[in-house]
Every structure is written in structure tokens, then in C-alpha cells.
Image: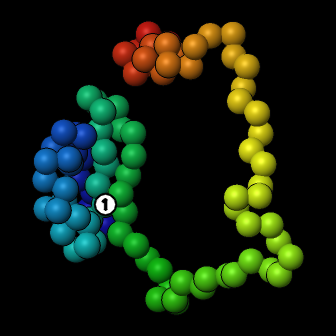
Amino acid sequence: MTTSAVRIADLKSRFSQHLRKERAGRSITVLDGSTSIARIVPYEGDGGALTIRHPLSGDPSLKQILLPPPLKLPRDIIVLLLEERHGQR
């Protein structure tokens, strides 16, 4: 299998073109700068159909399922995300 390396901006601007290469059997390594962050590979499924399973009778609806309480973090999550995005962490 042939692999090509593509930066995020190029992948975003020419996504369809890159997917055509991937469909032809090539894998794509996604780069953030010079760092590999992901790989897109051709799907090698067995050709089986997707099986949809319905909830069992008596199971609660999604509206009835309670979510856990939000985490109590010592710092603002937005500040943490921005630090990570800008490479400060």
C-alpha cells in the first residue's frame, strides 16, 4: 500500500481529491506541521451490512437517562484547551 503525507490545510482544501487517491488503495498520513497526527486508510470491510439493533422493551428512552454532573476542575476548561491548542502545555 502506498502512503502519502498531507498537511491539514491541504487536506481540507482538496479533501475530495485525496479521498479519490485513498479509494484507489493509498493511505494518507495527516500532518500538523511536521508531526503525524492521523492516518486515513482504505476501508477493508467484509462487505456485510450494518446491523441496527433496537432497544429492548422496557429500556429507558434517551431523554430519561440522567447525565453525570459536570466535572469540578481547578481551572477553566476553555483556558486549558487554548493552552493546548497554542502549544503552551
Relative vertical location of residue 25 with respect to residue 75 in this rendering, above or below: below
Relative vertical location of residue 55 with respect to residue 31 in this rendering, above or below: below
Left or right: 33 in relation to 82: left
Relative vertical location of residue 73 with respect to residue 60 in this rendering, above or below: above
Percent x, y of residue 44: 43, 77
Residue that numbered label 1 is attached to: 27
Which residue appears farthest toward the right when viewing the image? 58
Q: Quadrant of residue 26?
A: bottom left
Q: What residue type is labelled 1?
A: Ser
Q: In which quarter of the image is residue 7?
A: top left
Percent x, y of residue 34: 28, 30
For label 1, the SS is strand
- In the depicted view, which residue is nearer to us: 80 or 54? 54
Q: Please rate how many residues cluster around mark 1, counting C-alpha atoms within 10 Å: few if below 14, some from 14 to 19, many from 20.
A: many
Disc tally is: 1
Residue at coordinates 69% horizontally, 81% vertically from top-left? 54
Image quadrant containing the N terminus: bottom left
For the rendered model, the colour scheme is: rainbow
Left or right: 57 in relation to 70: right
Residue at coordinates 34% horizontally, 32% vertically from top-left? 35
Residue at coordinates 31% horizontally, 49% vertically from top-left? 29
Relative vertical location of residue 39 with respect to residue 50 in this rendering, above or below: above
